[in-house]
Amino acid sequence: MMNYEYLLFDADDTLFDFPKASSRAFEKMCRAHDIPYTPENYRLYHEINVELWAAFDRGELTKEYITLERYVRFLGFLGLDRDPAACNRTYMNALGEGVYPLPHAEAVCRELKARGHRMYLVTNATAYVQRRRLQGSVFARLFEAAFISEEAGAAKPNRAYFDYVRRRLPGLTAENALVIGDSLTTDIRGANNAGLPCCWFNRLGKARPEDLRVDYEIADLRELLEIV
């Protein structure tokens, strides 16, 4: 007998290798716009991007602002006269093509589907990128739907985001659903805010937080098969 019929998976760094996709998309952007592609430049871009997305998670910035502003700051720091909007378009197009599942993600999801679980993506990623990536992956045949923050009008960890999901899945309850994700600030806190059980995918071995309820903790996606 299954413990959780509805499985709500985060996408990036839970199913997809986002750092790999991002670094390759950044390389394509650099080559297309005659920007030196170096580890130092990617590190600079990454630091700017992480800082801006952390502000988004706190509800301080919009996604539209972030995707342009990161290139405004990056190009400004390097003193390069390039069109930040064009750089961002190139990067986003390349990112949407970057389908790199994490170890065991495909096999685990296939097994869960065979067992009769209903699987959904719950993500704050840009809709254009995430839908392209999903359509180009095996997960398109395994997941029933993707709930993306910019289409929901709210983002994880806001309870309003999970209320949006619940309205579209009327059979989902706090007893038959499990949120699975790597991010403490969006996935686990979001599940806490929504009153839903959660499983923290802690593949990097971080310390467990004291201010959040973590119902399950796994370091390998295969461990999920023993929980659900």
Image (cartoon, grey):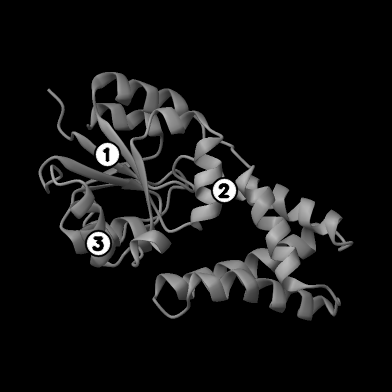
Residue 93, position in %: x, y? 67, 52
Q: Quadrant of the N terminus?
A: top left
Distance Cα–Cα, label 1 vs label 3: 20 Å
**Residue assigned mark 2:** 18
Q: Please report the residue visible at 24 percent of the width from the left and 29 percent of the height from the top.
A: 117
Q: Amino acid at mark 1?
A: Leu
Spot occupied by residue 200 in the image (x, y as percentages of width and height):
33, 48
Helix, strand or loop at label 1? It is strand
Task: Bin the neighbour count of mark 3 within 10 Å (Cα to Cα): few under 14, some 14-19, many 20 and up.
Answer: some
The residue located at (30%, 56%) in the rendering is: 188
Residue at horizontal 23 percent and vertical 32 percent from the top = 227
How many numbered circles are shown? 3
Tell me the SS state at disc 2. Answer: helix
Residue 186 locus on image (x, y percent): 36, 61
Q: Looking at the image, can residue 211 be seen?
A: no
Q: Which mark is residue 212?
A: 3
Task: Name which residue lies at 19% across and 54% down.
Answer: 167
Q: Which mark is residue 7?
A: 1
* Mark 1 residue crowding within 10 angstroms, few (<14) / some (14–19) / many (20+): many
- Of 103 and 161, nearer the camera is 161
Q: Which circle marks residue 199 in the picture?
A: none
